[in-house]
Amino acid sequence: MSKQRQPIVGFVGPMNARKTLLLLDHIFAAEAVGETVLVYKPQVDDRFGVGIVRSRCGGTHEAIPVPESPQGELKAQSSFILDDILKNNKKPTLVAIDEVMMFDDDIAEVVVSLSEAGIQVAYAGLNMNYRGEPFSSGIKELMSISTRLEVLSARCTYSHDGIHKCGAPATMTQRLKNGEPDSYDSPLIVIEKFATEDQKPVFTYEARCLTHWSISGTRPQKTTLP
């Protein structure tokens, strides 16, 4: 007998695009009608607390922290979600995953397994990394199998004078190292730290339009234009 999948809903885009806020709205709507929801996030993302999903626009929810993957690069272990549900005999209606781009390359396969097991899935995360490339093969595959996908934009926060901001539609995520565009050769995943000025280096992220997004260094090119 064939398996009927449950919906897979994604909210993706750059920094400050309301991705987590929409995920939280999705969670709260499910809980409001009595559905059981399990929320997962990478353990390494401790900006607001290890067991908390929080939107910069407001709203929080408890989350189960997912440990690092053997695949390295600070990625979270996708298979942990299945193990957690099976080993603890949990039967959620909905599994919600925040910062999904930080999960390892098995995330799409895990989500399909959940969907085929009769569990709805919703996720939020960056679709592109600070280099302006797809964040991972996992997020690319996950976006392609989503039954509902919202690709969001933000407003560009670039300011030439420290007062007035650009405000144009922003689709890019700018990583700044000590206030300057980071290098292409830097690690893919660096957790933003709300650091004081005497802590160096300080990494921050902003939403930028194409005009004001930039990166130092050179992207390796497979082909060149004549």
Image: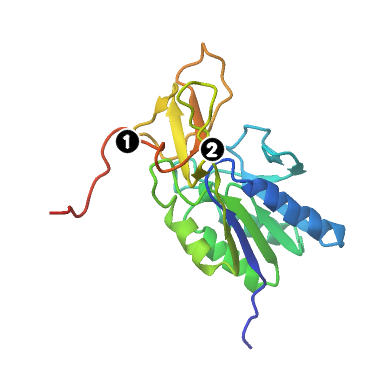
Q: Quadrant of the N terminus?
A: bottom right
The residue at which mark 1 appears reads as 185
Q: Say which mark, if any, is on residue 167.
A: 2
* Quadrant in the picture for residue 32: bottom right
Q: Is residue 152 left or right of residue 6?
A: left
Above/below status of 193 relative to 32: above
* Quadrant in the picture for residue 195: top right
Image point (68%, 55%), residue name: 96
Image point (75%, 52%), residue name: 25
Image coords of residue 108 (percent x, y): 53, 62
- Sequence order check, earlier mark of 2 and 1: 2
Q: How many marks?
A: 2
Image point (65%, 47%), residue name: 20
Q: Quick one: which residue is furthest to the top in this view?
A: 198
The residue type indicated by label 2 comes to: Gly
The residue type indicated by label 1 comes to: Asp
Secondary structure state at the residue bearing disc 2: loop
Mark 2 to mark 1 CA distance (whole Å): 29 Å
- In this orientation, does residue 36 appear? no
Image coords of residue 10 (percent x, y): 60, 59
- In this orientation, does residue 166 appear? yes
Relative depth, front residue between 16 and 194: 16
Relative depth, front residue between 148 and 84: 148
Above/below status of 125 relative to 35: above
Q: Is residue 210 left or right of residue 42?
A: left
Type of colouring: rainbow
Image coords of residue 142 (percent x, y): 52, 62
Q: Nearer the viewer, mark 2 or mark 1?
A: 2
Q: Residues within 10 Å of mark 1 (few under 14, many from 20)?
A: few
Tell me, yes or no, whether the two marked residues, 2 and 1, touch with CB atoms within 8 Å: no
Image coords of residue 180 (percent x, y): 40, 25
